[in-house]
Image: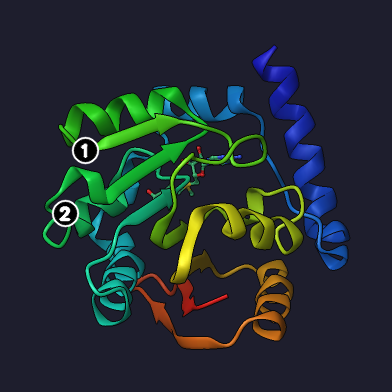
């Protein structure tokens, strides 16, 4: 089952890379694939030093513009972003991380008690509370339609006057998505960071 699912998502990803992104279509991946990857430790490397730059950039924007407000960490994985944010968020009421993978959030709960981590798929559900800052770190393209859906999602999850932080690893197809977001929103700030291996991320903050 999981092997068939993997083949399906591999073909879909190839199609996405070739054409689909041009039409504003995202590349959602099924829960089974994520559960297996987190079970096998495939994302543990996100804690490594070479991955740290974009996390630090998000924290910088949060501190500079977010005024210590509450945070929704969408697609939080094992809580790596929270590891970087925890000095600035002391009250568990001020943070909710959620991820499609129960394996990922179970690990996050174990690492960061008493902070809140829930299993949730942003293509299906939204949290029942609103936040001052909503962060999508390397996951916004897993929406089925990353531009239309983000806007509807923020209507339900962002407090009035709140900010959104998006970070994406550099892929050519993400440039299309960045253009759509830049056309739609006025960025308060943005930056690109490059690590010692030449891997690049772009991070932005905006008010919808
Ligand atoms: C590249 S990882 C980034 C993880 C995390 N943001 C971090 O900084 O460590 C992408 C994450 O998006 C999550 N994800 C993918 N599709 C999702 C969805 N539809 N709803 C919620 N989370 C999703 C995956 O499970 C994975 O944890």
The answer to whether mark 1 is within 8 Å of ligand 1 is no
Residue lying furthest front: 160
Q: Position of residue 106 (x, y in %)?
A: 32, 24
Name the mark nearer the viewer: 1 or 2: 1
Judge left or right: residue 91 versus residue 59: left
For the residues labelled 1 and 2, the Cα–Cα distance comes to 10 Å
In which quadrant will I find the N terminus? Answer: top right
Judge left or right: residue 197 versus residue 158: left
Residue at 60 percent across and 22 percent down: it is 32
Residue at 28 percent across and 28 percent down: it is 107
Is residue 40 visible in the rendered structure shown here?
no
How is this picture coloured? rainbow
Q: Which residue is mark 2?
A: 86
In which quadrant will I find the C terminus? Answer: bottom right
Judge left or right: residue 71 versus residue 207: left
Residue at 52 percent across and 66 percent down: it is 168
93 in relation to 41, above or below = below
The 10 Å Cα crowd at callout 1, few under 14, some 14 to 19, many 20 or more, is: many
Q: Which mark is residue 115?
A: 1
Q: Position of residue 60 (x, y in %)?
A: 26, 76
């Amino acid at each position: 089952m999981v092997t068939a699912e993997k083949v399906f998502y591999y073909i879909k990803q190839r199609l996405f890379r070739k054409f689909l992104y041009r039409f504003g279509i995202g590349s959602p991946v099924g829960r089974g694939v994520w559960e297996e990857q987190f079970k096998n430790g495939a994302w543990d490397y996100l804690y490594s030093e070479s991955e740290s730059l974009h996390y630090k950039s998000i924290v910088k924007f949060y501190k500079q513009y977010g005024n210590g407000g509450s945070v929704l960490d969408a697609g939080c994985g094992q809580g790596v972003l929270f590891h970087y944010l925890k000095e600035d968020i002391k009250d568990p009421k001020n943070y909710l991380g959620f991820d499609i993978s129960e394996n990922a959030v179970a690990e996050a709960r174990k690492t960061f008690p008493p902070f809140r981590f829930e299993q949730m798929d942003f293509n299906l559900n939204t949290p029942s509370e609103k936040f001052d800052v909503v962060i999508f770190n390397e996951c916004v393209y897993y929406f089925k339609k990353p531009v239309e859906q983000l806007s509807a999602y923020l209507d339900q999850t962002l407090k009035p006057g709140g900010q959104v932080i998006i970070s994406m690893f550099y892929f050519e197809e993400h440039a299309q998505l960045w253009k759509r977001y830049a056309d739609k929103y006025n960025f308060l700030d943005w930056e690109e960071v490059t690590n010692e291996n030449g891997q690049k991320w772009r991070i932005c903050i905006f008010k919808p």
